[in-house]
């Protein structure tokens, strides 16, 4: 087992990794930018190293500085968390060549799944269902048009180097496909330095359901069930739950086995997530694979009783996974609400600043993963997530009720947060019944159409009736 792990990240995930290391009696090194001096991960780690000014390019994404920090502190492994360099194959290679174990999959697996067209092709070859579309990247607009003719419109053009919803364009007919194609290539080139695009049939109002996978170096590869992630906005998830209210136990085993088969095709190691789109009629399709621990991993931990971050560390150190597929059991239901420093009434604009008061809820079945405290200033440079509330219960109604109570109890002053948004979402009848799709947030927040203005009363009788109705409204219930 490792003696010392450097955490190449900040925020709640840095704390999460520190806690896992402490359980395993591994000492920890925090790295921080000048904007994060007061962050809890710096205080809770055994050692800390400042790696540069606030912009990520000069700190958390600066590979040479991270490697230097690992060298001077004598770390033997590096945990990348999520975001930043977590899915950067080059970083994984540099770690290995400098003698540090990268806590994650091998560089070639990150690279393969990072090219979404290659990932699609690989999973198609492994027998997973993929949305009808191109075999690989497209040669030109004419190929796209002839393909679209055979599969039918609407279609979606995606950047091979994109993922997570970045670099996508929908075309509803040939004219818009011809117009979009060049733009999509140019955008992909500008954003990812890679013009390659591929094409798929467009699925309207899908559900986003992802499976947690885990592989070790002893040939064991398992799944830990799914997470429902349809409640998202601009590809940022806001609420996640496990299990999905949409899947039957039989479907869970079927899709889980598929996900394992796909991951086995690339000899997958460590934690990974396979994302599927589910159609309204229950058909499902492989979308992409994320080669990192994800923000929403706690809902899986709560329902399976596992510690995925400890497993990541153990497996990276060459130890076998602590459970086999037949040991995985699902208990109850878990929901996660992301608390972001954002104002949902103004298009979720960021609301950084000083937290003047902070009260954390508690009680049975409640977990809070957060790095903030009263007096902490949320810096404007990074992701706006300040914490995650995770409620677990014997079933979905109990988990939901526990979450509602926690959101009610929680007090954050000084900044705007997504707590009021979560109240709104959880009270929605569609959420309550589990009737979710990727358009949920949009339709939840869309201003209700104004009722048609009432015609002006034309006579005294009508006036009297209106006055009576108004009085009844004012007095009633
Ligand atoms: C799609 C799609 C419809 N049809 N692909 C967005 C994230 C990326 N992983 C895949 N995404 C989508 N791919 C086809 N063929 C719709 C989306 C999509 C979406 C997917 C999951 C969650 C939210 C989404 C929001 C908009 C679009």
Image (cartoon, rainbow, N blue to C red):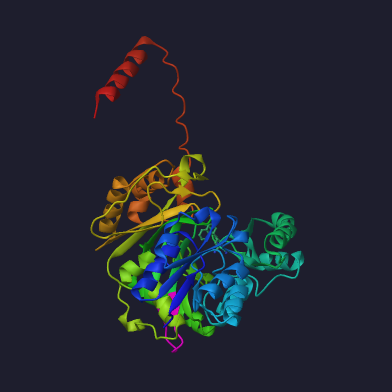
Magenta span of residues: 213-224
Choose between 108 and 447: the one closer to the eye: 108
Choose between 118 and 295: the one closer to the eye: 295
Choose between 212 and 35: the one closer to the eye: 35
Choose between 11 and 365: the one closer to the eye: 11
Question: Which quadrant of the frame does ligand 1 lie within?
Answer: bottom right
For the C terminus, the image quarter is top left
Give left or right: position of 367 versus 49.
left
Residue 52: x and y, percent? 59, 60
Instruction: Name the image quarter holding residue 55.
Output: bottom right
Residue 456: x and y, percent? 44, 17
Instruction: Name the image quarter holding residue 178.
Output: bottom right
Check if residue 220 falls in the magenta segment: yes
Instruction: Name the image quarter holding residue 115.
Output: bottom right
What residue is rendered at 35% in x and 62% in y?
A: 245
Residue 42: x and y, percent? 45, 61
């Amino acid at each position: 087992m490792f003696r010392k792990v450097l955490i190449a990240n900040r925020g709640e995930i840095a704390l999460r990794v520190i806690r896992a290391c402490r359980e395993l009696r591994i000492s920890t090194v925090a790295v921080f930018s000048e904007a994060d001096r007061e962050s809890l991960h710096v205080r809770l780690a055994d050692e800390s190293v400042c790696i540069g000014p606030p912009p990520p390019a000069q700190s958390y994404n600066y590979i040479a500085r991270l490697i230097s920090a690992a060298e001077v502190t004598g770390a033997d492994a590096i945990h990348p968390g999520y975001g930043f360099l977590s899915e950067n194959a080059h970083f994984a290679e540099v770690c290995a060549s400098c003698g540090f174990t990268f806590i994650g999959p091998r560089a070639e697996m990150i690279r393969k799944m990072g090219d979404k067209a290659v990932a699609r092709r690989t999973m198609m070859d492994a027998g997973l269902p993929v949305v009808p579309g191109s075999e690989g990247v497209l040669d030109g607009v004419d190929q796209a048009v002839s393909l679209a003719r055979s599969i039918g419109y609407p279609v979606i053009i995606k950047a091979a180097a994109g993922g997570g919803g970045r670099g996508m364009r929908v075309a509803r007919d040939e004219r818009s496909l011809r117009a979009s194609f060049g733009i999509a290539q140019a955008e992909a080139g500008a954003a990812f330095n890679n013009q390659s695009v591929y094409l798929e049939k467009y699925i309207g109002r899908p559900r986003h359901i992802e499976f947690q996978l885990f592989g070790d170096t002893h040939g064991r590869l398992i799944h830990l069930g799914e997470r429902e992630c349809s409640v998202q906005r601009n590809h940022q998830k806001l609420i996640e739950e496990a299990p999905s209210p949409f899947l039957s136990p039989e479907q869970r085993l079927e899709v889980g086995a598929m996900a394992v088969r796909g991951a086995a095709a690339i000899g997958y190691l460590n934690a990974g997530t396979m994302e599927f789109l589910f159609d309204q009629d229950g058909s499902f399709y492989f979308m992409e694979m994320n080669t990192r621990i994800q923000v929403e991993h706690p809902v899986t931990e709560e329902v399976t009783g596992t510690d995925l971050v400890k497993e990541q560390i153990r497996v990276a150190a060459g130890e076998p996974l602590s459970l086999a597929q037949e040991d995985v059991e699902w208990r109850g239901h878990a929901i996660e609400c992301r608390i972001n420093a954002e104002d949902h009434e103004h298009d979720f604009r960021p609301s950084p600043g000083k937290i003047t008061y902070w009260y954390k809820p508690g009680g049975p079945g409640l977990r809070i993963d957060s790095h903030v405290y009263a007096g902490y200033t949320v810096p404007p440079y990074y992701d706006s997530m300040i914490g995650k509330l995770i409620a677990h219960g014997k079933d979905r109604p109990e988990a939901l009720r526990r979450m509602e109570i926690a959101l009610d109890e929680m007090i954050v002053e000084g900044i705007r947060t997504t707590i009021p948004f979560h109240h709104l979402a959880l009270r929605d009848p569609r959420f309550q019944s589990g009737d979710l799709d990727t358009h949920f947030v949009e339709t939840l927040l869309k201003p209700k159409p104004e009722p048609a203005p009432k015609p002006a009363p034309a006579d005294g009788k009508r006036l009297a009736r209106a006055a009576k109705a108004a009085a009844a409204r004012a007095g009633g219930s």
